Image (tube, grey):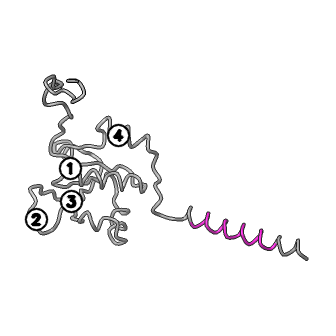
Amino acid sequence: MNELKNLKFIILALVILLILVLVRNSDRNIFRSDVKTAIEAIQNNSNLLSPDQLLQLKSPWMVVNLGNSDLPDSLHIENSIRIPFDHLLNDANRKILNEVKGDLIVYSADVATASKAWIILNQLGFKNVKILAAEVIPEKLKYKFQPDTTARLKLDSI
């Protein structure tokens, strides 16, 4: 009788574990994209588009403007919608983004906001997400590094 009672607890624990695994796998907010592909896209700048490259695209595309509706925008594109970054993952907006055919291009006056949106959408499984950047400036050092040789530690003078 005692063994049967222990067996019931083991089966109950396994059923609970199975339910937790199923819930975890069915969550739609789990990251789906491989990190290596995202890193390659960032290093190669293949996720960036200039306005000239945007106009030369042959495939269908949609620009998502992530700016606030209160502020004026310097970019006026016909095939665009405005979704504030704070509301990007609302159910209604996700439905709109899922229905986009072709490239999904995110734009914000602040490139950091567009980069955050690119990472989120890329990891949620959206394909062909790109960042519309006004200009691509490779990061480089402004000044040559020169250590300060006049500074000494307090213990050096002893």
Chain-order first, disc 4 or disc 3: 4
Q: Is residue 117 left or right of residue 54?
A: right
154 shown above or below 128? above
| In this rendering, the label closer to the viewer, 3 or 1 | 1
Mark on residue 71? 2
26 and 151: which is toward the camera:
151
In three-dimensional space, the C-alpha distance between marks 3 and 1, rounded to whole angstroms, equals 11 Å
The Cα atoms of the two marked residues, 2 and 3, are separated by 12 Å
Q: CA distance from mark 1 to mark 2?
A: 16 Å
Q: Quadrant of the N terminus?
A: bottom right
Quarter of the picture containing the C terminus is top left
Amino acid type at circle 1 is Val
Say how many tags the image has.
4
Mark carried by residue 111: 1
Residues at badges 3 and 1 in contact (C-beta under 8 Å)?
A: no
The reply, left or right, for residue 62 in relation to residue 38 is: left
Report helix, strand or loop for mark 4. Answer: helix
SS at mark 1 in the image: helix
Q: Position of residue 14 (x, y in %)?
A: 72, 66
**Region rendered in magenta:** 8-23
Residue sitting at 36 percent across and 63 percent down?
A: 99
Q: Earlier in the sequence, mark 3 or mark 1?
A: 3
What residue did someone put label 3 on?
65
Tell which circle, 1 or 2, labels the residue nearer the N-terminal end. Answer: 2
- Is 130 part of what is drawn in magenta? no
Q: Are marks 1 and 2 in contact (CB under 8 Å)?
A: no
